[in-house]
């Protein structure tokens, strides 16, 4: 169970990062060039939302299945972890949740915009911040085996 969920979370992360980068780049280009917000833009933003939500779901399961999630916090306490352990058990999951909240806010705000520029702007800002947060707290070396 643990290794399957971990593998799923690990591989799904490539798609999540890819679609988030595409959605943010698309929104920045749309914002800067004054394009119309068409159904292609809606689909890209919606896919990014769905992919990140699925990652949240897999991440939550992993948090309780992994020895580096909830277990680590209950066994060691907040202060008893090394910085690598704190990244896995605390910083990555919680900053990840925060990022997904921002992305969800961006999605719902873009729908209320009256202009195309406004819609692109909300996606660019909130998805962009979410992406930066995710990137800042990924367990890079464990993931890529560096
Ligand atoms: C967009 C959001 C996220 C991305 C892109 C992402 C990506 C990753 C990656 C690449 C790893 C390393 C996997 C490996 O070493 O093979 C990882 C580990 C982990 N993630 Fe996430 N994650 C996200 C959100 C979350 C959330 C929201 C949670 C929990 C609530 C979570 C829980 C975990 C845990 C517990 C591990 C450590 C697993 C272990 O080594 O046993 N992740 N994540």
Image (cartoon, grey):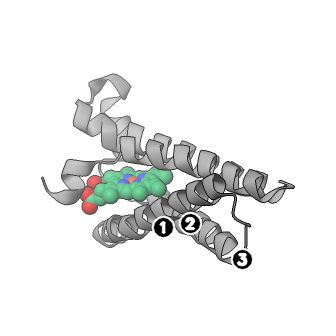
* Residue bearing mark 2: 48
Instruction: Ligand 1: give its quadrant.
Output: bottom left
* Residue bearing mark 3: 39
* Residue contact between numbered discs 1 and 3, judged by CB atoms under 8 Å: no
Q: Mark 2 or mark 3: name the one nearer the start of the chain.
A: 3
- Whether residue 64 appears in this view of the structure is no
Look at the picture and state if 97 lies above or below 87: below
Q: CA distance from mark 1 to mark 2?
A: 5 Å
Q: Quadrant of residue 108?
A: bottom right
Q: How many marks?
A: 3
- Whether residue 133 appears in this view of the structure is yes
Q: Using the image as rendered, state which of residue 99 and residue 26 is in the foreground.
A: 26
Q: Quadrant of residue 92?
A: top left
| Numbered tag placed on residue 34 in the rendering | none
Q: Residues within 10 Å of mark 3 (few under 14, many from 20)?
A: few
* Residue bearing mark 1: 19
Look at the picture and state if 46 lies above or below 63: below
Instruction: Please name the residue shown 26% across and 38% down the image.
Output: 85
- Report x, y in % for residue 59: 45, 58
- Report x, y in % for residue 38: 73, 73
Judged left or right of residue 140, residue 122 is right
Q: Is mark 3 within 8 Å of ligand 1?
A: no
On-image quarter of the N terminus: bottom left
* Residue contact between numbered discs 1 and 2, judged by CB atoms under 8 Å: yes
Q: CA distance from mark 2 to mark 3?
A: 14 Å
- Report x, y in % for residue 48: 56, 66
At mark 2, the secondary structure is: helix
């Amino acid at each position: 169970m643990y290794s399957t969920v971990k593998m799923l979370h690990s591989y799904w992360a490539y798609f999540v990062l890819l679609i988030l980068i595409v959605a943010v780049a698309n929104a920045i280009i749309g914002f800067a060039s004054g394009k119309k917000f068409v159904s292609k833009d809606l689909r890209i933003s919606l896919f990014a939302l769905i992919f990140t939500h699925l990652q949240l779901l897999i991440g939550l399961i992993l948090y309780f299945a992994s020895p580096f999630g909830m277990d680590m916090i209950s066994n060691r306490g907040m202060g008893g972890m090394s910085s690598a352990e704190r990244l896995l058990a605390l910083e990555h999951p919680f900053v990840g949740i925060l990022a997904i909240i921002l992305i969800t806010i961006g999605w719902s705000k873009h729908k209320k915009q009256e202009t195309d520029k406004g819609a692109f702007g909300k996606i660019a800002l909130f998805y962009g911040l979410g992406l930066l947060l995710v990137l800042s707290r990924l367990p890079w070396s464990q993931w890529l085996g560096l």
